[in-house]
Structure formats: C-alpha cells, structure tokens
C-alpha cells in the first residue's frame, strides 16, 4: 500500500493548478491526522535508530537514509507531550521543509485524500496560537462527514529547533498569524 502511495505523489502534485489539495492521512493513538503531500518525500518503516543523548524530548534519534542522516521526531511527543508506545513498530514519514529533511514517526498510514480547497477549513481560533494544527479537512467518505486535522509541520520543527530557522515576524503579519522565512 505504501508503495502505491509514493508512486502517486509525483503525479498528484500537478493538482495545484486545479484548486485541489492532497494530504497523507496517518494515525497517532487511534486518531487520524494529515500532512500536506507537498512536504512528504517518502514513507517507510523505521530503520535502525541511533539515540542522541541530551536531545529534545521529541527527538527519538537519527537514522541514515539514502546517504543522509536525519532526525526522527516522535510526532506524538512533539504534539501531545506523550511518548509513542512502541517506536520500533512505527512508520516514518520523511518530510522536507525549508531545505531541512526530517522524519515524523507515526503509528499507521491510511491513505491520501484528494480534496478541493473549499473543504479545507482554517483551524479554529480556540486551538490557540501555540497549537500544531494548521487547518481541518472536511471529508465525505461512505456517506459520513469527518474532520481530519492537518498538522503544522513547520511549527513542530520550529519548536524542536528554533535556531535552525531565521523567522521574521512583522507586527502586521503577527496580528494575522503569518510568518515569513528568509
């Protein structure tokens, strides 16, 4: 199933011009979440992990994939401050953002959702500025409507390693919740 997901990611990136949004749906402790497929490089079983002493609590360690070392982030720990039950049985979503490659450990991969932007809802203000949800997808599957939260990958990465990014927030942008990098 994962092989089919990754084979389709490249062809799916062409949907941007057609007012479409695609997200990879995964689960953490039985709840479904999503990540924008544009940030996903690949999905794989967690390879051999090297633990790093004195690292951020959400960083499980590093792995070596395709001649590159990358940090493995316990997504559950980063978002909920709850450790993953069994990290060795997890699935790694390798992402790239701002020239940084890292892996997010999740419990299970489900499928890719292809939605219109009309089905992407801004995260409720009640979640607060310190939460890790960027939006909510409204999905109709098998006659039932469900809401799937889209994880704010950039926020998770920034919280773990803020010095890695030169983030500039103008007073005007901050009042609208907009961050610019560079």
Image (tube, grey):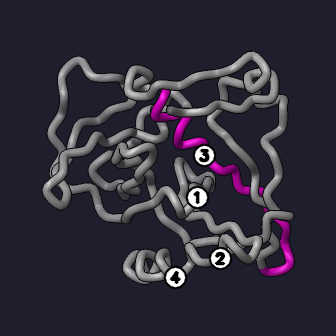
In three-dimensional space, the C-alpha distance between marks 2 and 3, rounded to whole angstroms, equals: 20 Å
Taking the image as shown, residue 135 lies to the left or right of residue 33, namely right
Helix, strand or loop at mark 1: strand
Residue 10: x and y in percent read: 47, 77
| Location of mark 3 (residue) | 151
In three-dimensional space, the C-alpha distance between marks 2 and 4, rounded to whole angstroms, equals: 8 Å
In three-dimensional space, the C-alpha distance between marks 4 and 3, rounded to whole angstroms, equals: 23 Å
Give the residue at x 83% y 29%.
Answer: 126
Give the residue at x 56% y 78%.
Answer: 12
Q: How many marks?
A: 4
In three-dimensional space, the C-alpha distance between marks 2 and 1, rounded to whole angstroms, equals: 13 Å
Residue 152: x and y in percent read: 60, 42
Answer with the quarter of the image where residue 90 lies: bottom left
Residue 24: x and y in percent read: 56, 64
Answer with the quarter of the image where residue 132 lies: top right
| Location of mark 2 (residue) | 15
Foreground disc of the pair 4, 3? 4
State which region is magenta. Answer: 142-158
Q: Nearer the viewer, residue 61 or 97?
A: 97
């Amino acid at each position: 199933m994962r092989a089919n997901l990754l084979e389709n990611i490249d062809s799916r990136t062409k949907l941007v011009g057609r007012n479409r949004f695609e997200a990879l749906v995964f689960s953490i402790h039985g709840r479904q979440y999503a990540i924008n497929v544009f940030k996903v490089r690949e999905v794989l079983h967690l390879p051999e992990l090297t633990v790093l002493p004195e690292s951020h609590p959400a960083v499980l360690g590093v792995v070596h994939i395709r001649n590159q070392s990358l940090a493995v982030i316990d997504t559950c720990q980063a978002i909920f401050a709850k450790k993953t039950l069994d990290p060795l049985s997890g699935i790694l979503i390798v992402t790239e953002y701002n020239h940084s490659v890292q892996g997010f450990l999740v419990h299970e991969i489900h499928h890719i959702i292809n939605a219109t932007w009309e089905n992407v809802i801004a995260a409720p203000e009640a979640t607060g500025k310190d939460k890790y949800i960027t939006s909510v997808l409204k999905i109709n599957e098998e006659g039932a409507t469900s809401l799937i939260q889209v994880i704010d990958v950039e926020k998770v990465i920034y919280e773990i390693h803020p010095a890695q990014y030169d983030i500039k927030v103008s007073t005007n942008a901050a009042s609208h919740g907009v961050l610019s990098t560079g």
